[in-house]
Image: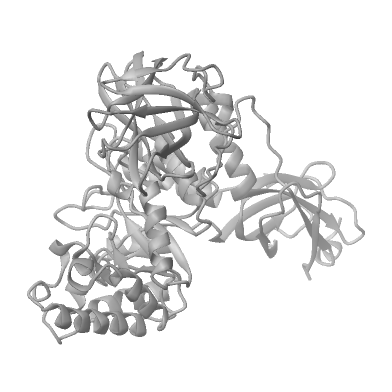
Amino acid sequence: MDIMKRENLVLVLSYLLITAGFEVYAQNYDYSYTAECLKNPLKPQYNGGIVVNPELNDDLNGWSSFGDAKIEHKVTNDGNKFIVASERKGPYHGFSQNFQLEKDKFYVISGWVQVSHGDAHSVAVIFKTQNGFEHAAWAIAKSGCWSMFKGGLVVNASGPAELYFETNNTSIDIWADSISVKPFSQEEWKSHQDQTIEKVRKSKVAIQVVDSKGMPLPNATISLIQGRANFPFGCAINKNVLNNTAYNNWFFSRFKFTVFEDEMKWYSDEPSQGKEDYSVSDSLLKLCKSRGVSVRGHNILWDDPKFQPNWVPSLSPQQLSAAATKRVGSVVRKYSGQVIHWDVVNENLHFNFFESKLGQGASANFYRLASQFDKAPLFLNDFNTIEEQKDGASSPANYLAKIKQLRAGGYNGPLGIGLEGHFNTPNQPYIRSSLDTLASAKLPIWITELDVSSGPNQAQFLDQIIKEVVGHPAVQGLIIWSAWKPNGCFRMCLTDNNFKNLPTGDVVDRVRTTLSHEGLIGTTNSDGYFETSLFHGDYQAIVTHPLLLADSSFQHNLTVIPTADESDEIRLLSYKFTTA
């Protein structure tokens, strides 16, 4: 082919967006959770797994007393059978079942509980093991209807374990039914993550290159460069990024989402009463805008008494109400339309500074007020909901209760679930089951401050946690809490002070590379096709071929979007490029 013919060559790039397919594994995972309190419990998940007599159809077979309590088998008028513990002499006294648990297995625990009288009793689901007591799940049990619980467990050594239920009020009877303990191997667990990523985060794409006559062009090289990803993956920053070129380059070469570590908090913006200073947060926001980085608004108010501006704790209730109202209006008006979320009353599951001064409706009032000044979703944000199974204050069940409390208080606008994620040792089945529980609220879920405490397994744990949350269908974004400071980060740095990656930074870079398909290059087959599976987002396709001039290429932008589940629909998009 001569040069003139080369210059008049026309290429057509077509891509087919095909519903992602995936292999179905024998041990599928059940992501469901029922938040409603029901007249009768549903069937046990996994048919009870390794639980003996999970539906109590065989009297009390498999169940025994734990501590000092009377246990009975009962049947309702409509035939539902269940176990009851009464005359309990202590919080942990009730019924139990024994198991042989294996190290390196992941156990998912679920079931239904009810109490004899009263409302909103917190019930802990615990395993007594040879190494101690392991919390697995929490429920808020009521009388007159059945409440579901769901949790997870890993053990450090194989051996005996005893499942039991604990609640502080010994005057109530505990009822239970449809109990399940389901073990999964690590291979099965990873397969669930892979399935979810292929089904929820990615779509299969077939790209075809043909010439102007519609003939396929084999051996064309296709390079795909991701622009904006549909799954936000970012990292916190602080004011040091403004004046440190190395930090600036390291961060902005990697991330399109961020949150400011301290610079948008009340104690930073108004250190003295009536003297607001937004200069640092203004500079950070201006820089992020110039680099195309989206920012979460963190935070408007903080319910922890330790983190108020130093002039706030001494205010009278009337003065505090006025000051907090002014704060909400000031920061939200100023940055309205410039942030993607607002954390309105930070950590109000664990703390109650404003409620103790202004009444139980304080949080709902501030959410309603903030919504008047900005349309961005307003988030709850708290710690230990997915990272610490022993902390009942912010258990998934209590988190759902707080959402209901905000709604009952009159806030009915956009709401999101913020999970900080400050981990020590991750319990992967507890993380997943907690996310299942929270997903029942049908609200956006973000991991907002992910880090792992220092230790020999820090990078390994970080990798496990990221894979778990990215592999969960309900999670919509993830922010790493690793803003750099010369004297050390909050708990976890990604680089040293020369901005060379630490092992944690290598983990984050591998995740980024995976999510963005960095360096992805393919070659068309004999039919002119290149097929791959892409994370949803915007891409630039660059196509070169031997028939093109050496310095010529075909370029076009394409968007890979989610396809409807189980849909057979195929999207066909065609583009033309002339080299002349």
Residue 203 seen by the camera: yes
Return the residue nearer the eye: 362 or 344: 362
**Vertical placement of 14 versus 95: above or below?**
below
39 relative position to 340: left or right: right
The image shows residue 564 at horizontal and vertical percentages of 72, 53
Q: Quadrant of residue 142?
A: top left
Quadrant where the image shows the N terminus? bottom right
Residue at the extreme right? 213
Residue at point 56%, 49% (across, down): 517
Answer whether residue 447 is visible to the viewer in this image.
no
Q: Which residue is at the far front?
A: 77
Where does residue 561 sit, x and y in percent of width and height? 66, 58
From the top left corner, tell me how far across and down residue 514 is, in percent: 52, 45
Decide if residue 271 is on the left or right side of residue 395.
left
Applied colour scheme: one colour
The residue at the point 40 percent across, 37 percent down is: 430
Q: Is residue 370 above or below residue 163?
A: below
Where is residue 376 drawn, in percent x and y? 45, 74
Across the whole image, how many numbered discs are drawn on residues?
0
Q: Nearer the viewer, residue 173 or 105?
A: 173
Which residue is drawn at the image coordinates 37% and 49% (left, top)?
119
Q: Quadrant of residue 533?
A: top right
Q: Quadrant of the C terminus?
A: bottom right
* Residue 567 shown left or right of residue 317 in the figure: right
